[in-house]
Amino acid sequence: MERLWSPWRSAYVTGAGGGDIGCIFCNIDQPGRDELVLVRGRSAYVILNLYPYNNGHLMVVPYRHVATLAATTGDEQTELMRFTRLAEIALTEAYAPQGINMGINLGRPAGAGVVDHVHVHAVPRWNGDTNFMTAIGDTRVLPEDLAATRKRLQPIFQRLADSNT
């Protein structure tokens, strides 16, 4: 088995380098994090992934600290799905991907970097882009700057959220 090392994600996955901030999703209003938020609802929000796998990689997150979908309320489920749907629409409009991975990783063995706060990943995909990894062989896929991603996506999310689409 070959291994692909991504030490640049270590601080994110282990929580190192950020001090004692607690849950990264519960502490979303901390300086430097709040500008990643694309849209806010009553029980959930949409945020850019600080360490994206592809351009446009975002997450739909409940405000409440819950580890599983089974622990969410009906209102949280409704808003999570509504925002996940808006993510599909916004990513399609902004990036014209050929596919989109929508996924929830429950538990570290399933690939969760944040194991105790459920969230939905939305990752735009294109032909030839065959997995979630940011590198394929000797090629590193560098996503656009997060500020550019936000500038591209936030107006779309705001329009969709305001229209109750």
Image (cartoon, helix red, strand yellow):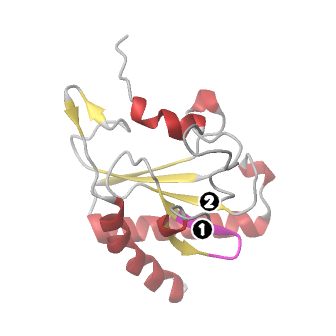
Which label belongs to residue 18? none
Q: Find numbered disc 1 in the image and state the secondary structure of the residue it sits on.
A: strand
| On screen, residue 162 above or below 33 | below
| On screen, residue 130 above or below 90 | above
Instruction: Answer with left or right where residue 26 lies relative to residue 30.
Output: right
Q: What residue is rendered at 74% in x and 46% in y?
A: 67
| Residue 149 sits inside the magenta stretch | no
Residue nearest the observer in this picture, 84 or 113: 113
Q: What residue is rendered at 66% in x and 39% in y?
A: 115
| Circle 1 Cα neighbour tier, 10 Å, few/some/many (<14 / 14–19 / ≥20) | many
Q: Position of residue 24 (x, y in %)?
A: 62, 52
| On screen, residue 55 above or below 81 | above
| Circle 2 Cα neighbour tier, 10 Å, few/some/many (<14 / 14–19 / ≥20) | many
Quarter residue 92 falls in: bottom left
Which label belongs to residue 61? 2
Instruction: Answer with left or right where residue 21 lies relative to residue 52.
Output: right
Quarter residue 128 falls in: top left
Q: Position of residue 81 (x, y in %)?
A: 60, 64
Q: Position of residue 53 (x, y in %)?
A: 37, 45
Residue nearest the observer in this picture, 129 or 62: 62
In contact (CB < 8 Å): disc 1 and disc 2 = yes
Residue underneath mark 1: 45
Q: Find numbered disc 2 in the image and state the secondary structure of the residue it sits on.
A: strand
Quarter placement of the N terminus = top left
Q: What residue is rendered at 75% in x and 54% in y?
A: 65
Q: Amino acid at mark 2?
A: Val
Magenta stretch, residue numbers:
41-46
Q: Position of residue 141 (x, y in %)?
A: 25, 42
Quarter residue 78 falls in: bottom right
Q: Amino acid at mark 1?
A: Tyr
Instruction: Answer with left or right where residue 21 lies relative to residue 5.
Output: right
In the displayed orientation, state which residue is furthest to the top.
Answer: 1
